[in-house]
Image: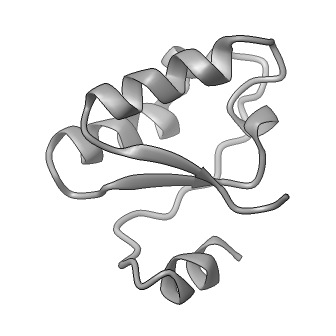
Amino acid sequence: MHEEYALTSGWTVALTVVDDEMEKPPERRPMFLAGLQMIKGNGAGAILIPSGAAVSPIEGEFDEFSRRVEKAGGFIQVTRR
């Protein structure tokens, strides 16, 4: 689904990961950190997620992680509404 979303937006998919460690905060989830590192290294420009709750169900953690991604030069895109 994310690949289709990226392609219809004209984006190249740099990395596809499945993260099922919802019990950990975003800064302790290896797959989110890998995406953040790709943005920092200019290997990617965005992290696609199905919903804000995929980052964290805890209020504020999505916003904090989104700010970290933006500070690194990218953005988070929610692909489902």
Q: Quadrant of the N terminus?
A: bottom right
Q: Residue at x 80, y 33 (%)?
A: 53
Q: In the figure, is residue 61 to the left or right of 36?
A: right
Location of residue 70 by image quarter: top left
Q: How is the image coloured?
A: one colour
Determine the residue positioned at 50% across, 64% down.
16
Most foreground residue, 62 or 17? 62
Q: Is residue 64 above or below residue 70?
A: above
The location of residue 76, given as percent across then percent down, is 52, 45
Tell me if residue 71 comes above or below residue 75 in the rendering.
above
Residue occupying the point 39% across, 22% down: 68
Would you say 13 lies left or right of 1 here?
Answer: left
- The residue sitting at the left extreme is 41
Image location of residue 7, percent across then percent down: 50, 86
Q: Quadrant of residue 60?
A: top right
- Residue at 71% from the left image edge and 30% from the top image edge: 21
Q: Position of residue 22 (x, y in %)?
A: 77, 27
User: In the rendered view of the protein, which quadrant contains the C terminus?
Assistant: bottom right
Q: Nearer the viewer, residue 56 or 63?
A: 63
Counting from the top left corner in percent of width and height, residue 25 is at 64, 14
All told, the count of numbered labels is 0
Say above or below: 51 vs 67. Answer: below
Give the side of residue 69 with respect to residue 81, left or right.
left
